[in-house]
Image (spheres, rainbow, N blue to C red):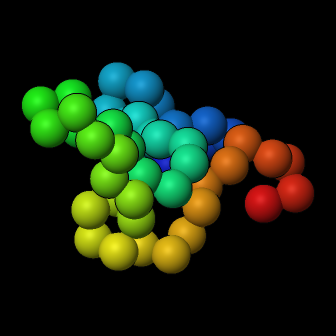
Amino acid sequence: EFDGPQIDPKHWDYDLGDGFFNYEANQWIGGWGNNELQNYTDRPLN
């Protein structure tokens, strides 16, 4: 499923940033909810 220049959106997706917004709790969850320190960007240099 990873045999090309891009992921297949029928099977995979991705998020950019360093967390997500929990709409039910109306709050930002930093670290993706598991304390990850990575920050994902769409910069070509990554």
Placement of 10 over or under 30, stated as above or below: above
Question: Residue 46 or 16: which is nearer the viewer?
Answer: 16
- Confirm whether residue 3 shows in the render: no
- In the rendered structure, the answer to whether residue 11 lies left or right of residue 39 reads left
Q: x, y percentage for residue 24?
A: 12, 31
Among all residues in the image, which is located at the extreme left? Answer: 24
Placement of 26 over or under 19, stated as above or below: above
Placement of 10 over or under 20, stated as above or below: above
Q: x, y percentage for residue 3?
A: 55, 47
- In the rendered structure, the answer to whether residue 1 lies left or right of residue 6 reads left
Residue positioned 55% across, 43% down in the render = 16
Residue 32, picture quadrant: bottom left
**Screen quadrant of the C terminus:** bottom right
Question: Residue 10 or 30: which is nearer the viewer?
Answer: 30
- Confirm whether residue 32 shows in the render: yes
Residue positioned 61% across, 37% down in the render = 6
- In the rendered structure, the answer to whether residue 1 lies left or right of residue 22 reads right
Residue 25, picture quadrant: top left
Residue 23, picture quadrant: top left
Residue positioned 72% across, 42% down in the render = 42
Placement of 15 over or under 23, stated as above or below: below
**Screen quadrant of the N terminus:** top left
Among all residues in the image, which is located at the extreme top? Answer: 10
